[in-house]
Image (cartoon, helix red, strand yellow):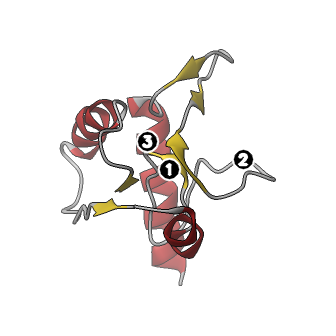
Amino acid sequence: MLAVPGCPNVPLLERRLAEALTGGPPVTVRRRVIADVAEAARWRMHGSPTLLVNGHDPFAEAGTLPAVACRMYRTENGSLDGSPSVAALRQALRQALEQAGAA
């Protein structure tokens, strides 16, 4: 998980991610504080918070540039939220596990 200091959306993503991981295989969650745009570009952070799953941002929108700003996520009904939903997180994690198994 990548975040800028003081991002108000981080606790929301942490809660939803914990719920999404409940009952699944063991997963290591690492947190990294991003201080500037160069670091955001290096880590491919598209706003705070960004969740990388196996080094990939499953929620990145095409054409989004690296940013050290708060990030909003598009929900299933088209509105904006500070984190992907639990269902969206579960789907992203499931897809990553399937891809890792195919490799």
Q: In which quarter of the image is residue 87?
A: top left
Q: Name which of mark 2 and mark 3 comes first in the sequence.
A: 2
* Viewer-nearest residue: 21 or 52: 52
Compared to 41, does 6 lie above or below?
A: above
Give the mark count.
Answer: 3
Q: In which quarter of the image is the N terminus?
A: bottom left
Hey, what amino acid is under mark 2? Glu
Residue shown at the point (47%, 75%) measured from the top left: 100
Q: How crowded is mark 1: few (under 14 residues within 10 Å), some or many (20 or more)?
A: some
Give the image location of residue 9, x and y in percent: 37, 32
Residue 22 is labelled as none
The residue that disc 3 covers is 89
Q: Distance between the residues labelled 2 and 3?
A: 15 Å
Hey, what amino acid is under mark 1? Ala
Q: What element carries label 2?
A: loop
Give the image location of residue 31, x and y in percent: 27, 60
Compared to 52, does 69 lie above or below?
A: above
Residue shown at the point (73%, 51%) measured from the top left: 64
Give the image location of residue 5, x and y in percent: 31, 47
Q: How far apart are marks 3 and 1 (CA)?
A: 5 Å
* Viewer-nearest residue: 51 or 44: 44
Residue shown at the point (43%, 65%) measured from the top left: 97
Do tag 3 and tag 1 residues touch (Cβ < 8 Å)?
Answer: yes
Which mark is in front, 2 or 3? Answer: 2
Q: What element carries label 1?
A: helix
Q: Residues within 10 Å of mark 3 (few under 14, many from 20)?
A: many
The reply, left or right, for residue 30 in relation to residue 4 is left
Q: Is mark 3 on a helix, strand or loop?
A: helix
The residue that disc 1 covers is 92
Residue 61 is labelled as 2
Residue shown at the point (57%, 54%) measured from the top left: 58
Hey, what amino acid is under mark 3? Leu
